[in-house]
Amino acid sequence: MAFSLTILGSSSALPTTLRNTTAQVLNIQERFFLIDCGEGTQIQLRKFKIKFGKINHIFISHLHGDHILGLFGLISSYILFSRKTDLHIYCDKELENILYNHLKYFDGDFGFNIIYHFLNSSISELIYDDDLIQVITIPLNHRLPCSGFLFKEKPKPLKIQKEQIQKYNIPIKEIKSIKDGEDYISPDGEIIKNNELTFPPESARSYAFCSDTIYNESIIEYIREVDLLYHEATFKHDMLKRAMETFHTTALQAATLAKKANVKKLIIGHFSVRYKNIEPLLTEAKSVFENTVAAEDGMRVDV
Amino acid sequence: MAFSLTILGSSSALPTTLRNTTAQVLNIQERFFLIDCGEGTQIQLRKFKIKFGKINHIFISHLHGDHILGLFGLISSYILFSRKTDLHIYCDKELENILYNHLKYFDGDFGFNIIYHFLNSSISELIYDDDLIQVITIPLNHRLPCSGFLFKEKPKPLKIQKEQIQKYNIPIKEIKSIKDGEDYISPDGEIIKNNELTFPPESARSYAFCSDTIYNESIIEYIREVDLLYHEATFKHDMLKRAMETFHTTALQAATLAKKANVKKLIIGHFSVRYKNIEPLLTEAKSVFENTVAAEDGMRVDV
């Protein structure tokens, strides 16, 4: 089952001809989550062949233009495509006003609801919860209220050993409780231990998105041991002062957080346009945390 | 001296991977005018190597998203680039509110003024006037208040025949009046006719931008004999009903206007995304007005 992240934009502040501003699509078991929505996101979705009609949930970290300016065009296109499905947007409460001031000029039929879920960026909250997945916010520290997002699969059921089920002639109605870990008691009272009937479950996967933020060790408790961490690395560490002034992180710092949180893999991104070549940022991060990759627009990372 | 138009976007309503939404840059003698500003305009400017710091005047036809959504990113970038020069925007008065609702979230230093020039779309007005160029609005008929723009060079001075000036030993202080068409009277009273001293001036060039609009013959008086006409051609003529319902024009109609106005060259654009191949629209237009080209993103047309 899919758990894959596609980078739609990896530049900070300004788009370039090679990098759009921040946006990502996370596909967890064919649920598509859009994370941030920089200018041109709808064009990137087309370019990387992601059907944007499948996106029903949009997570907006904060209200700087490089994270939201693609929303207007995307929503405009949804109207033109006669979208019917509710669109959920998780965001700072001010975004509703910003969007409203655009939407009132759209004259297409607005056949769907936008359902806003306002975030409190000073705490961690459960903001999305379905049968498979939870999304929890991560308080970040930027110049505006800003939230990261932790996407995690719920613990998965045990996997049935089909041959054993046949061998003991276990009726279908018992399968659910076996998947939940119970033993099976046969009609003649024999107890079959659960571990004879099941394999261990697939592990529940997780992805944490942290952008934009100053270096902040208090996020470690949320990102600990995630399979994949995206952390902004706007600057190389020789620009630490500038990073701190602008509430951003250096590549070295992003890797330090990845290491301290013992994550499995790190993607760095949100690169300042001053870096025509981001290899030095990647090298810097890898010196601390080897399993790091540098985001590129169109890159897909499977967990 | 340059008089060249660069197409930055030629799609209507929705961007595609090949066509952005409406935006154009007109360079008249190194004055750069941006006409409309669809999503991703700043990316297109980079792609087609137009320095956007040179743009001081932006003309917005109307407030539909596919004509304005690039403004926020462009202005955001101007802030990040520490722009100092005034930025003039010619637009419907509502745009100030829309922009204000974004700009209040920008936290960079805002080192320049945005000077709004509000348009009355029901009349034709002179909205820009310098020593070389005038811009006049063209009332269009769309679903929202909408203006086209006629850019025209002012009549140019006569060109001096340098050899004749030397031959008659004419002092420099007389050159201006000769360029303005006056004869020269020598110190001994001889009258040298102006046409002995000058060549005819270069012709003053003109460009008319008409998008979005329903077919409307009342624009002919404004676009008559322009060197270059851009007219929207959202649909093929077999979709005339749809064109009329949505206040758009067909390729056949755009060419009919070009012919009736006796323009020199027509560019059609603002194509519906239903046309993967716009050759049939071009063929249709050429059947009425041969000197037609179909807009492509990145296309440059020199007058």
Image (spheres, coloured by chain):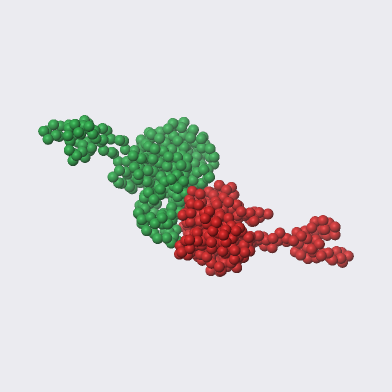
Chain colours: A red, B green
Relative side of A272 to A86, left or right: left
Residue A245, position as x, y percentages in the image: 45, 64
Q: Which residue is pictured at 76% across the width and 60% down the height?
A: A199
Residue B255, position as x, y percentages in the image: 44, 35
Q: Is residue A197 visible?
A: yes
Residue B240, position as x, y percentages in the image: 50, 38
Q: Is residue A299 above or below residue A262?
A: above
Q: Quadrant of the C terminus of chain B?
A: top left
Q: Is residue A193 above or below residue B77?
A: below
Q: Which residue is pictured at 55% across the width and 52% down the height?
A: A296
Please state which of residues B49 and A178 is positioned toward the viewer in this rendering: B49
Question: Residue lying farthest left?
Answer: B188
Residue A112, position as x, y percentages in the image: 56, 55
Q: Quadrant of the N terminus of chain B?
A: top left
Please state which of residues A172 and A206 is positioned toward the viewer in this rendering: A206
Please state which of residues B144 and A258 is positioned toward the viewer in this rendering: A258
Relative side of B234 to B223, left or right: right
Quarter assignment of residue B179: top left
Q: Which residue is pictured at 56% across the width and 64% down the height?
A: A256
Q: Which residue is pictured at 51% across the width and 37% down the height?
A: B278
Q: Is residue A162 above or below residue B18?
A: below
Please state which of residues A295 and B300 is positioned toward the viewer in this rendering: A295
The number of numbered discs placed on residues in the rendered structure image is: 0
Question: Residue lying farthest right?
Answer: A188
Relative side of B191 to B111, left or right: left
Q: Is residue A88 visible?
A: no
